[in-house]
Every structure is written in structure tokens, then in C-alpha cells.
Amino acid sequence: MCGILAVLGCSDDSQAKRVRILELSRRLKHRGPDWSGLRQHGDNYLAHQRLAIVDPASGDQPLFNEDKSIIVTVNGEIYNHEDLRKQLPNHKFRTQCDCDVIAHLYEEYGENFVDVLDGIFSFVLLDTRDNSFIVARDAIGVTSLYIGWGLDGSVWIASELKGLNDECEHFEVFPPGHLYSSKDREFRRWYNPPWFNEAIIPTTPYDPLV
């Protein structure tokens, strides 16, 4: 269990704003007592409170690709990370952390890489090359995640509501099995197993007397 907090596209890139985001991130310290990290790129901030499990020595976050143009903050565990590393022979990994594959997979496959991940996860990925970002949550929502919108149009992401509710005019649960892309400004379902069909989901209300 780690804590993530991201503020994307805010109108304030001042030192005071940075201090405020650090303060909000510390509200999630109980989720990750081993490391605190913050990366700022212009008007985007990605913060992380880490519980060190896989590669405790060098898996500090946020994580990056080789030239640090892709920034990622993740809560969760990628079970098939070793197999995924083998599929990325041309990439150099900075750590042995299971989540280190995410930035490199994005480089290779774009936003559609999420469905190759086997695990439980919530993450925010910022592509500094065009200032775009994506947010995703695991298939059934094992990891907690919330999304909010500030008055200035900024998008806020946090593992717990206490990280964003003071700053957002509106916030909601980030839906499991979905991805939010800044390019589309909307949610889309990434988890689409062959058996999934909304047409056959029961719609009759539960009646305990029947």
C-alpha cells in the first residue's frame, strides 16, 4: 500500500503551491512511511508516499523512463513485471521495482499498454513531451483512487479523499477498470474481458424476501 497524489494542469506553479502539495501528500504518509517523493514539471505535480516491498533499496518514486520524459507515480503491484521486462529488451531499467515497467511500456505501446498489466494498481503517468497524462485503476478496484477537479480546471488524483477534497469543487471515485486520458478528457474502460457484457448484468433489485 502506497499513497499517490497528483495535481495536473493547475494554474499555479509557485513555490507556495509546491509546499501545499507536499503538505497534502503528507496526509497519506500512513500509507507509505518508507519514502516521500515529489516531481514537478511546469504546472504538473506528482507526489508519492512509498511502502517499500519490491526493491526496497532503489525503487523510490516517482519513476521515470531513460531520459525522464515520462514520469509515473504508482500504488500497487505488477505481478508479471519480470515477463514484461523480457519484452522490453531495448530499454534500460533504473530499478528492480515491479512498477518500473510502466513508463517503458507506455513508450512502446502508448495508452493501450494497460491491459497487459497483471496486478493491482492505480497510477498517474505524465508525458512531458506533450504535457499529456493518463490515469488508470486496476480491473476491480483493489487499490483505492479518487479524482477531483479544481476551480482552475486542474485535475487532482489521490489514493484517499483527504489528499484532494479541500482543493476541489467536485470529486468522485475513480471507476475500476477505467483509464482517464487528458487527450480525451473522459473515462474509458480498458478492462474488456471476452465474457464482459453489460447487456447481461442483472438489473432486478435485490429482494431478501424472495
Image (cartoon, rainbow, N blue to C red):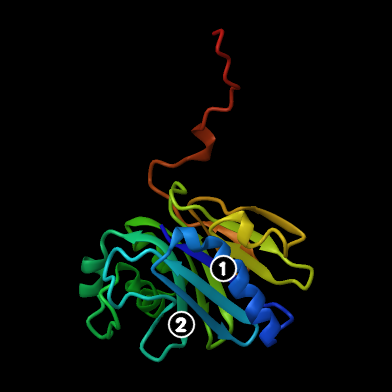
* Percent x, y of residue 61: 41, 75
Q: Callout 1: 10 Å neighbours few (<14), some, many (20+)?
A: many
Q: Is residue 41 left or right of residue 50?
A: right
Depth-wise, is mark 1 or mark 2 nearer the camera?
Answer: 1
Residue 103 visible:
yes
* Percent x, y of residue 191: 44, 53
Residue 7 visible:
no
SS state under label 1: helix
Give the residue type that dot 1 points to: Ser
* Percent x, y of residue 88: 26, 78
Residue at mark 1: 25
Residue at 43% from the left image edge and 63% from the top image edge: 32
Residue at 27% from the left image edge and 75% from the top image edge: 57
In this view, the residue in front, 38 or 171, is 38
Specify the quadrant of the image occupied by residue 50.
bottom left
> In the rendered image, which quarter contains the N terminus?
bottom left
* Percent x, y of residue 185: 65, 67
The relative height of residue 46 versus residue 30 in the rendered view (above or below) is below
How far is disc 1 from disc 2 in space, using C-alphas?
A: 21 Å
The relative height of residue 200 versus residue 20 in the rendered view (above or below) is above
First along the sequence among labels 1 and 2:
1
Residue at mark 2: 70
